[in-house]
Amino acid sequence: MAQKKATSGIVEDAKRIAVLSTPIRIELVTAIQALGGVATVAELAMQLGRSADGLYYHLRTLVRGGLLEEIIDADARRYRLVTPPGERMRLRYKPGATANAKAVARVAASMSRLAQRDFVRALAHSDTIVEGPARELWVARLRGWADPDDLLEVNRLLQRLSDLLLGTRPKPDGKLVAFHWILAPIDAKPARRDAPADSARRRSPTDGATHPKKGRR
């Protein structure tokens, strides 16, 4: 099925983004990116450890959504990212009460599920390297203040990691790895004042009030 050639790898239409809202389709797109932008069904099945038959429906959905191009040769059926050569697919966010934001949030939720699955699976293997300079399994959450220069450096390092991992072919001594990240600004909430003692909070409005004593008759 022919697709209109993309002039960039940016996807911002909410309907196209929504096509990526399932973990398997995210896996397919990232696997094709890792294989250089084009792959056969057999290559994808081997990369993902799934049967080829189970991938066709999702690949066709990605084609209909305008994210992949199907190439039918005499000997194989290949799928290519609808992005310019050498450019990876990226989502453009439109924050606020937008259809785009809802679609992006669904994709983020699926990516988070993938990250959890990858981590738990690796943690179950006793030979996974979890210490030292060649560490391959790591989960952490950092929270800190970043000025504009700091954010420039954070984005530069994330781009460097992306360039390091994307478009690489299998290596004789290599290992397939997945790298997930979320960078998000958070509200800096004002310090809370010391809360009153529990006993004081539980006291009713009339507790402690001075009641006139009844006089003796």
Image (spheres, rainbow, N blue to C red):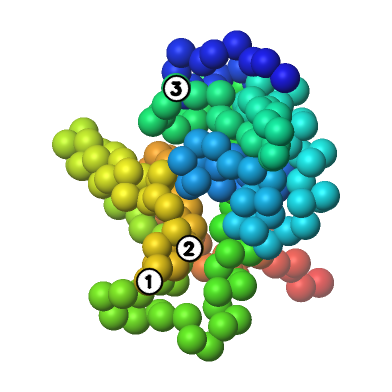
Q: Which mark is residue 176?
A: 2
Secondary structure under tag 3 reads loop
Q: Which mark is residue 84?
A: 3
Q: Amino acid at mark 1?
A: Asp
Q: CA distance from mark 3 to mark 1?
A: 30 Å
- Please report the residue visible at 17 percent of the width from the left and 36 percent of the height from the top: 149
Q: Quadrant of residue 1?
A: top right
Viewer-proximal residue among 191 and 184: 184
Q: Earlier in the sequence, mark 2 or mark 3?
A: 3
Secondary structure under tag 1 reads loop
Q: In the rendering, at what x and y percent does residue 49 appear?
A: 68, 62
Q: CA distance from mark 2 to mark 1?
A: 10 Å
- Please report the residue visible at 69 percent of the width from the left and 45 percent of the height from the top: 41
Q: Earlier in the sequence, mark 3 or mark 1?
A: 3
Q: In the rendering, at what x and y percent does residue 116 appear?
A: 60, 62
Q: Amino acid at mark 2?
A: Leu
Q: In the rendering, at what x and y percent does residue 138 appear?
A: 42, 69
Q: Amino acid at mark 3?
A: Pro
Q: CA distance from mark 2 to mark 3?
A: 25 Å
Image position of 166 with respect to 72: above or below: below
Circles 3, 1 touching at the beta carbon (< 8 Å) = no
Which image quarter is the C terminus in?
Answer: bottom right
Q: In the rendering, at what x and y percent does residue 63 appear?
A: 71, 26
Q: Give the farthest residue toward the bottom.
A: 126
Q: Is residue 103 visible?
A: no
Q: Which mark is residue 26?
A: none
- Please report the residue visible at 55 percent of the width from the left and 19 percent of the height from the top: 12
Q: Quadrant of residue 148?
A: top left
* Residue behind mark 1: 173
- Please report the residue visible at 45 percent of the width from the left and 59 percent of the height from the top: 170
